[in-house]
Image (cartoon, coloured by chain):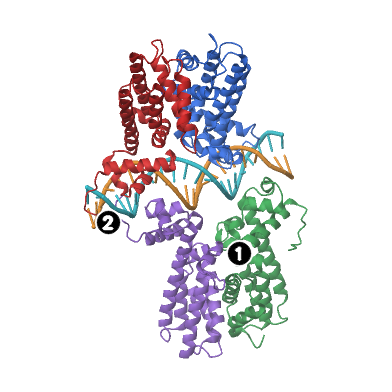
Chain colours: A purple, B green, C red, D blue, E cyan, F orange
DNA sequence: ACTGGCGGGACACCCCGTTCCT
DNA sequence: AGGAACGGGGTGTCCCGCCAGT
């Protein structure tokens, strides 16, 4: 039945519904109908906010890109506090949670979606590229703070940490890796670059 | 791309066609139609050699799994020779070439395919899990050979190396990373574990 | 935004808008949306004046039925004056003008609308049936006036004249037939029934 | 279940199914689905034979146009035999049977279909225009045969006869007109043009 | 009283995996 | 082996009727 009342943040409701479908039923179940059904809105509403279903998917991926930026900002704020391994490990857990992982998989499968996000930039996979950039920034910060050696290569370390974090999360089908596994592998990567027991 | 498999048999022709489609148009374009069209055979032929389209995809992934085993065997044969970084870097280049990368993406999107490959084992992503296993074996070999420290964790290092290698390859859409980038990041990961300048 | 001011004759505005759409874009383009858009009023307004969109269409057809009655009355008033052919020809031009023709087409496609107009009567196409009835009445009048032979069949002649008039108008898509064509065909039909050169 | 067997005259089966739907459920029920369901074929088959659903409708109208040509040929063959009124009346009954009438209504409602049928010709309603042409040809034949007066206007008579025939058939919603009604009206139209009691 | 957003249903068109007759 | 057909599903689009607001 029609409500007669304008929806509050229809765009957000649709994206949230898309996430729920993605998590519950997997990327193959992401259809325009399943999204509007899940959001409990009319079919046509999706096309009010998104010209295309692909544009919706792009926006969905974009939400994780933005989430990664938030995580990166948080991470940058922890420069000098806690331990480097702990900070990195925590960031990986947040980036590659079930939702993030699902969206990375979506981005990897639908490579063409990336071209909608970045118009003229260099090609890159949305979420992963941003995660690497944020991680590099943090490691550079730690380098300045003296907790990472000056001859270390933050960009390469960032690639290693993000790539490994992704693999760890994606490699386990039944669930996400436990914290100790992430800690161990992060430490293995960073140990040579650390200035002391951080 | 010569696979070494005779192209006379329909099965091989179909798999080769699948690879070409995957490389040219991406995993989303892999359909039974696009494969049979690319192979220039009738649609029904695919079902003569594979009970299912999913079985075809599984077989496609399996080809790379086998390739990874070959690479792993080669890598194991290089224990003690060359440099560790060079050996690992070379293996990564071979595993994550354009074809391998495309198949990993396919395996990541279609996680359910893994259940066709491994019957009762623990869940894992086919190609990546095998690559990690092979890499761990090699690193353990180097550890025994004394080129990697005894207190290093070969399994964690293998995860880091493979995960990073995958990210490096997948992150660049326009092409594969150059060798120096791989060398750098492998060195960054392994430097702490190396016994000397290998 | 609500204006707070009551529309003057919203019903009439909607019907007029419906006619314009019908003339400009044809019967297939007559939708509740196109009507309210054309009338520049809210979609809901139509529902205030008409319980149904079909009721709106019925009312639209009814306007022409009423127009036909006016034409028939005028025609009846011309019994004995002018020429029979001229009178009939003039009536046809008025009945099957662009608007009338469009409404006839609508009535022909939506035959079910007739059941809304006539409750218990015998089935008939609204506008055409009325036009035939009016024409029969006129011809009967002329028969009494002596300008049409006593052995002529006014009902059959009326059917012939109206049917032919409709065909002439409907057959030309680019525009209405010119007066001489109507005159010619009316004369061809009536010549045998005429008592002398009327 | 797929049959694997090529359909015999799939095009014809679809058109026949379209006619059945049109007759049974009316023009509004003519959808691509109802046609393929009625034909008991797959949905996609319609698009194998017709690029568009409108093209299907056009072809449907075309079938009646062709039927009219057959009737016209038959009619022309009857020049000089039987009676003119009987010949014309019979032709009208055949042209405006239930199926023909439904297709005329379709053509009147979807005027744009005509533009698919005739590319550069003068605008005209497909079936009716052809019927008039055929009728004119027949009446001209009778004129040459001496059964219609030399000063009669075959084209105008044809228009009158076809237009009236259409009205008679369309005017009765419950069923087609009986033969005597058609005879009467045809005689009323033609009586002045006949050379003697034909 | 009028507005306009929304629900729900249907439609055309398209594509996919699959079957099976020729 | 070839390829026509099948059934299911998905997208984008339209349309009608409803109704909470203003």
> Mark 2 packing: few (<14 Cα in 10 Å), some, or many (20+)?
few
Rendered image quadrant of residue C126? top left
Label pair 2/1, CB-CB below 8 angstroms: no
Residue D182 horizontal side relative to residue E5, left or right: right
- Is A45 or A173 nearer to us in this picture? A45
> Mark 1 packing: few (<14 Cα in 10 Å), some, or many (20+)?
many
Tell me the CA gap for discs 2 and 1. Answer: 55 Å
Mark 1 belongs to which subunit? B
Rendered image quadrant of residue C52? top left
Q: Is residue A128 visible?
A: yes
User: In percent of the image, x 25 and y 54: which residue is there?
Assistant: C2
Residue picked out by circle 2 = C1
* Whole-percent x, y for residue D195 in the image: 55, 12
User: In percent of the image, x 57 and y 78: which residue is there?
Assistant: B153
On screen, residue B76 above or below C153:
below
**In front: label 2 or label 1:** 2
* Whole-percent x, y for residue B80 in the image: 71, 81
- Is C84 or D15 nearer to us in this picture? C84
SS under mark 1: helix
**Do badges 2 and 1 share one subunit?**
no
Mark 2 belongs to which subunit? C
Q: Which mark is residue A141?
A: none
- Is B126 or A15 nearer to us in this picture? A15
* Whole-percent x, y for residue B86 in the image: 68, 80
User: In percent of the image, x 48 and y 17: which residue is there?
Assistant: D189
Residue D28 horizontal side relative to residue C144, left or right: right
Residue picked out by circle 1 = B104
């Amino acid at each position: 039945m029609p409500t007669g009342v304008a929806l509050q943040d229809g765009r957000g409701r649709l994206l949230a519904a898309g996430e729920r479908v993605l998590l519950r039923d997997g990327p193959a179940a992401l259809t325009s109908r399943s999204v509007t059904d899940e959001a409990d809105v009319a079919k046509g509403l999706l096309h009010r906010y998104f010209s295309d279903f692909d544009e919706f998917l792009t926006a969905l991926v974009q939400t994780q890109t933005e989430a990664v930026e938030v995580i990166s900002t948080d991470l940058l704020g922890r420069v000098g506090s806690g331990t480097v391994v702990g900070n990195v490990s925590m960031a990986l857990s947040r980036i590659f949670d079930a939702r993030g992982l699902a969206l990375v998989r979506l981005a990897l499968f639908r490579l063409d979606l990336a071209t909608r996000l970045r118009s003229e930039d260099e090609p890159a996979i949305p979420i992963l590229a941003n995660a690497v950039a944020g991680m590099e920034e943090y490691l550079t910060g730690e380098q300045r703070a003296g907790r990472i050696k000056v001859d270390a290569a933050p960009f390469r370390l960032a690639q290693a940490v993000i790539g490994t974090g992704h693999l760890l999360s994606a490699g386990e089908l039944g669930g996400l890796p436990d914290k100790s596994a992430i800690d161990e592998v992060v430490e293995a990567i960073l140990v040579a670059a650390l200035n002391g027991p951080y």
